[in-house]
Amino acid sequence: MNPTNPNSTSTRTHAHRAPILAAAASLLLAACLPCAAQQPESERSPSAPAKQAATDKERVAAITKQLRRNGKLPGVLLDAQFVEEKVGDGVLGPSEFFAFYALTVPASDLPAWRAALAASPVVNNTPAYAAPKAAAPWWASKADFGKLELFGPKSLTGRFNGWVGLAPDGRIFIYAFTM
């Protein structure tokens, strides 16, 4: 095998490998592009809402799991809705996230929820009404907001900013955001 001889076995082997390696690299790149083009759910803009869970049961299970990351829930969820909005692209400063939850629990469980939330007061002057940008029929109206008993969202969401509002009929509204 003489490296200066173009007819040597070593040179011919490498010459045949180059097109194969280029083709393999092209295929790998093409296979990865669709994955890279998809945005993670946490980076979707308000105009691109997350897909709804296939069934009510799956949606409630997913939201229950999400809220349990911060501790045990004081009761079961009968129904649950969630949307998160992102403002900013994270390039010229951090993005902010606004989360909206609407939970339905048995009205008889409200004392347990109230007791669990009592240690979390509303902080940072955030007890103002807020709603998702896209109208959501499951979200509290501005008129209903005035009738809610407010607590802080930290124990349920891990966020300090926002509020948890308890309605006497077993609905719980959670608004939490980052700054």
Image (tube, rainbow, N blue to C red):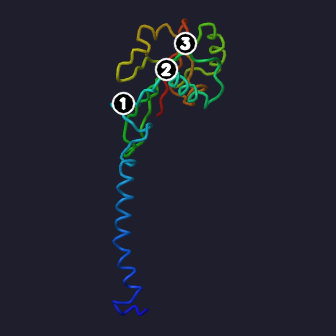
Q: Earlier in the sequence, mark 3 or mark 1?
A: 1
Q: Name the secondary structure under disc 2.
A: helix
The residue that mark 3 highlights is 166
Image point 44% across, 29% down: which residue? Answer: 84
Nearer the observer: mark 3 or 1; the answer is 1
Q: Amino acid at mark 2?
A: Asp
Q: Could you tell me how many numbered marks the image carries?
A: 3
The residue that mark 1 highlights is 46
State the image coordinates of residue 55 (x, y, percent, origin top left): 47, 23
Image point 59% across, 20% down: which residue? Answer: 121
Q: CB of mark 3 within 8 Å of CB of mark 1?
A: no
The residue that mark 2 highlights is 56
Give the crowd class for mark 1: few <14, some 14-19, many >=20 residues within 10 Å.
Answer: some
Q: Nearer the viewer, residue 151 or 77?
A: 77
Q: Name the secondary structure under disc 1.
A: loop
Q: Earlier in the sequence, mark 2 or mark 1?
A: 1
State the image coordinates of residue 130 (x, y, percent, origin top left): 42, 20
Give the crowd class for mark 2: few <14, some 14-19, many >=20 residues within 10 Å.
Answer: some
Give the crowd class for mark 3: few <14, some 14-19, many >=20 residues within 10 Å.
Answer: many
Q: Amino acid at mark 3?
A: Leu
